[in-house]
Amino acid sequence: MSETTMDEGHISNADEAGQGHEATAVATESRETTKSAAAPAADERLAYRSIFQRMFVQPEIGAIIGVIGVWTFFWAVSLNFGTAGQTQNWLDTASTLGIMAVAVSMLMIGGEFDLSSGANTGAMGILFILLIKEVGELGGLGISIWFAVPISFAAALLIGYLNGKMVERTALPSFIVTLATFFILRGLKLGMSKLLTGQISVTFTDEASGYDFWQPIFAGEWIRNEHIWNSRDIFYLGFAIGGAILLALSMCEMHFVRRETKSAAGFPVLGAGAAGVGVAIFLMHTTDGVNANALAAAVLGVSVLVGLIGLGMWRYEPVESPGGIRLTGKINMRIAIGVALVGAAILASFAIDSDNAETLFFPFTVQGLRVVLMMALGGAGFTLLTWAANLALRVNPTTKLAVSTIMAGAIVAFGFVIRASAEATKFRTELFSVFMFAALGIFVWSVMSVRFKERRSVDDGADALGMKGLGLGIFMLVLAVILRHLFVTQDELDAMVNPARFSVRMLWFFAFTAVMAYLLARTRFGSWTFAVGGNAQASRQVGVPAARTKTQLFMIVSGAAWLVGMLLAFRLSSLQAGAGDGEEFEFIIAAVVGGTLLTGGYGTAIGASFGAAIMAMSLVGIQSARWNTDWRFVFLGVILLLAVIANRYIRDQATATRR
Amino acid sequence: MAERALLELENISKFYGNIIALEGVSTKVNAGEVTCVLGDNGAGKSTFIKILAGVHQQSEGSIFLNNEEVMFSSPRDALNGGIATVYQDLAMVPLMSVWRNFFLGAEPTKGFGPFKWIDQQKAMTIAKDEMAKMGIDIRDTEQPVGTLSGGERQSVAIARAGYFGAKVLILDEPTSALGVKQSGVVLKRIVEARNQGLAVIFITHNPAHAYPVGDRFLILNRGKSLGSYDKDDITQQELTGLMAGGQELQELQQELEEAISGVKKT
């Protein structure tokens, strides 16, 4: 920290300082202070962290990488994961799990646990059904859904309130208190079901008054087959390509040093590149032959490179002398091992017969084993090559370009092997394209790094613009994915067997996550949640109502349990007395996978929702990969372990090295 | 009645059952002055702070704030009266950002009704600015408090107290866990706060830290006051001697010398 002037002019401020400040006075003064403080050598210990390094320490980043990784994994190893039908499948599982995971993660950030949350979901569903059910002998109350909804909601809030109050009054760990609530609810569910209906499950009726109004709210569906839109692919491609271009431009903007004066010399080059990209996409879209497509792909690759260099000439500071290639022994060794591993992966793919459809004693089929071998060996090889590239970057950009070129070459080779040896079109076309794009990206990025200066200092203007572009780009990509999943073209419809039904449940999930994320990040309640979880005593000392905040958190969890109870009741139309029991640990696992700290004070709502998505994808993905589902918990356990280690690393980075 | 200082204590005593934690302690602190409370472990310093901070209530004696006799029933009560306490454990949440910690419990909000949200921009600007006044440049107020050094954390706490309109600032052993340089930084902040017109009560067991910044010294020993001295009336040596209870220190010195010479012989 800088120990600059401290005695100047503060005495005259004494009165003001004593009584709090006018915002305007502060604003003008702060501008002066920041100006003087932001002088070049503000703090010699403050190393510059690029935007990517800073993004990497966001608490959600582990879960985001996990979502992408798990999705890609199952997309690669199964035939139908990634289709609308399977997406609907895992989103459905993720919805009920995710609503609870988000609520539970808020409570965990506040430093408490709720072991009754799982049983509570079932209890709310059963309570609701018993309220509206009209059964002969003892039966339910048979009241209107219009009354049953608010009554059951009030009951849920009451349970949360009692949980919170009991934890506060007894000062016992919430683990114990809510364990008691869990048993009480569990017993009540079974007892009441048997007492009132004589069965261990309660069945829903659609005769209760108000059903027609409430059914679409809690169980409405969007059947994809009914929504044909033949121009879908044009919009899909438009958004996807636009989004990808925006992402690339924003990353350049945040990564390279801006020129003092922009140079118009780059425009023609940029224009040529853009035109080339346009032509290539048009060619790809209109032609069908393999050779024509290969030509178009080559045009695309060159155009992207030319276009980005044009952009750089226009906007960014060039590198004077990038230096020659200097490979050290360390780098060479990693390249050698990396290339050898990729080679081994290629060999493995040839060694195992791609026509063999037998199931091994292991949960894998022969094909599964082949894919896993290829991915493990290839993954290890590419990791080593990435490592070599990072080491090379420390030498100079040219050396990195050399290593990256080798890596891109290995990726291309791997892609061609996949295309040659795979039977399914998915591997032959889609996975192949993914590999080609990855190779192109790595190569182009290294070329840019050699030609243009990478930023080593702060530039808030560039970062602000870049973040906006990044946000818009991601939004466009998401929009493209949504379009593709919600609408169907006639061709697709003809080839399809099962319709995908997107349920309103996922909207509840998204909305709930958004509201909770807002509460947590932008309101006093959110701040207090972090505070009571991070240091309860400290927050009490500064006047945070710790007990009230915690009680409200318990009420949020039980409110979420009510919502899930409603969704379950309307979906299943019949609930077992044991519904939801034991799921509380899945909620906690999802929250932890999403980056929530078990000991409180750290985490995000969005992260928890991604954690739920990872778990749901794994459960559904294992089925669609046709693996033996008996092993699914092994998979979940491994994911939990990896997630906890990754999150711990991210948290250490975020809290220890930022000075 | 004569004009009193901003905060005056008269014959404060505190009994826990039959234990006398504090007996007949008097001192005063003016705006723009530093009163140091010195004492060895178990001298009653903690009890003294807790009475002023409203955590405990005195058994006997009176506290005058702004010429009015007051009795603080809770920490919130003392805070509302303008007495802010910076505890040794800092009352900070290490995983939360600087600005969130700065405004914790009193976040500025925008909007109305249930749709209030935190005015983040304002909060960050003010936090940064108040820290700059303390001579600490925090480039990124989003960084967690846990990444700050001990001295910087003390500064956040002091700046926070000043910003929220404290008239009296109580610092509980702010230098005890710090290195030499960090202690120096915190001592500067104390002078800074005093210059801004705050009345500062600085609790410490280190006379070398207290003497340079203090205007008045209250020495406690085993729950009793050994007197309240103005700076002109006492030297650092006398202060150190008084603090350890004169006699005892001499004995200790003698024992030490004997021990050292014993080591040399063998």
Image (cartoon, rainbow, N blue to C red):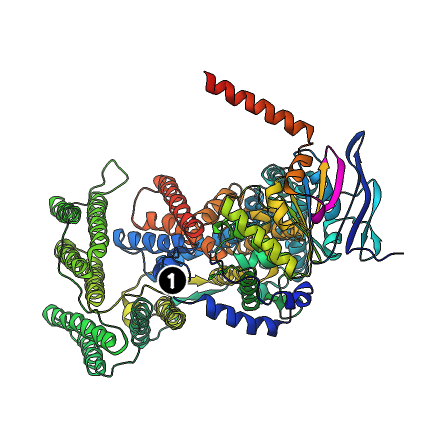
Dot 1: element = loop
Give the side of residue B112 with respect to residue A602, left or right. Answer: right
Quarter of the rendering occupied by the C terminus of chain B:
top left
**Magenta-drawn stretch contains A268:** no
Give the side of residue B63 with respect to residue A468, left or right. Answer: right
| Place of residue A405 in the rendered image (x, y in percent of width and height, measured from the top left) | 15, 59
Query: Residue A139: in sight, yes or no?
Result: yes
Q: Which residue is mark 1?
A: A500
Outermost residue toward the right? B1
* Magenta-highlighted residues: B221-234
- The residue lying toward the viewer, choosing from A545 and B251, is B251
Q: Callout 1: few (<14), some (14-19), or many (20+) C-alpha neighbours within 10 Å?
A: many
In which image quadrant can residue B257 be found? Answer: top right
Does A576 appear above or below B132? above
| Place of residue A277 in the rendered image (x, y in percent of width and height, measured from the top left) | 21, 76
**Magenta-drawn stretch contains B223:** yes
Q: Which chain is home to disc 1?
A: A
The amino acid type found where label 1 is placed reads Ala
| Place of residue A271 in the rendered image (x, y in percent of width and height, measured from the top left) | 22, 82
Does B18 appear above or below A210? above
In which image quadrant can residue B123 be found? Answer: bottom right
Does A127 appear above or below A287? above
Quarter of the rendering occupied by the N terminus of chain B:
bottom right
Give the side of residue A572 with respect to residue B73, left or right. Answer: left
